[in-house]
């Protein structure tokens, strides 16, 4: 079975490529207007997250994988902070904040599980 960080990285990359192709996959759940500008900014996020997801998939265990997951977690927490503030008072705020924070926590938990599993195999 692949490492859980590989699986969460692959899921991140797959969703992010989909957002690159169709930004409304992210804009609509956030309750944001789909404009030329918002789609461009959303594609930037998709490109960033595709790169991080691929880094999680390709990074060898150890420092490189920890750095890739750390970047993913930091980005998710940043997304939660920025979107949480931007969506203040909107009905989508809690959902968006929760999903961003939960995805970061899931990636971090996957890394911790993989590292503990590797340590017990030694």
Image (cartoon, helix red, strand yellow):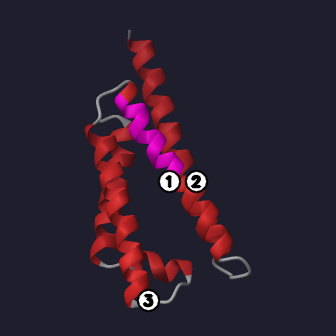
The alpha-carbon separation of the residues under discs 2 and 3 comes to: 23 Å
x and y percent of residue 57 in the render?
Answer: 29, 42
**Residue located at (74% from left, 81% from top):** 89
Label 1, on which residue? 75
Query: Helix or strand or loop: what does disc 3 sit on?
Result: loop
**Residue located at (36% from left, 58% from top):** 48
Q: Circle 1: is it few (<14), some (14-19), or many (20+) Cα within 10 Å?
A: some
Cβ–Cβ below 8 Å for labels 1 and 2?
A: yes
Q: Is residue 66 magenta?
A: yes
Q: Which residues are magenta?
A: 64-75
Left/right of residue 94 with respect to residue 64 in the rendered view: right
Label 3, on which residue? 34
Which label belongs to residue 77?
Answer: 2
Which label belongs to residue 91?
Answer: none
Q: Is residue 78 magenta?
A: no
Instruction: Tell me if residue 51 comes above or below residue 87 in the rendering.
Output: above
Query: Helix or strand or loop: what does disc 2 sit on?
Result: helix
């Amino acid at each position: 079975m692949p490492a859980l960080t590989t699986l969460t990285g692959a899921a991140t990359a797959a969703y992010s490529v989909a957002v690159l192709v169709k930004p409304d996959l992210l804009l609509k759940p956030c309750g944001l207007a789909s404009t030329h500008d918002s789609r461009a900014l959303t594609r930037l996020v998709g490109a960033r997250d595709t790169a991080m997801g691929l880094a999680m998939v390709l990074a060898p265990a150890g420092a490189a994988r920890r750095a890739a997951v750390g970047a993913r977690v930091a980005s998710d927490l940043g997304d939660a902070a920025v979107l949480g503030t931007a969506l203040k008072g909107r009905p989508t705020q809690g959902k968006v904040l929760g999903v961003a924070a939960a995805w970061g926590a899931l990636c971090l938990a996957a890394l911790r599980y993989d590292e503990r599993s590797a340590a017990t195999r030694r």
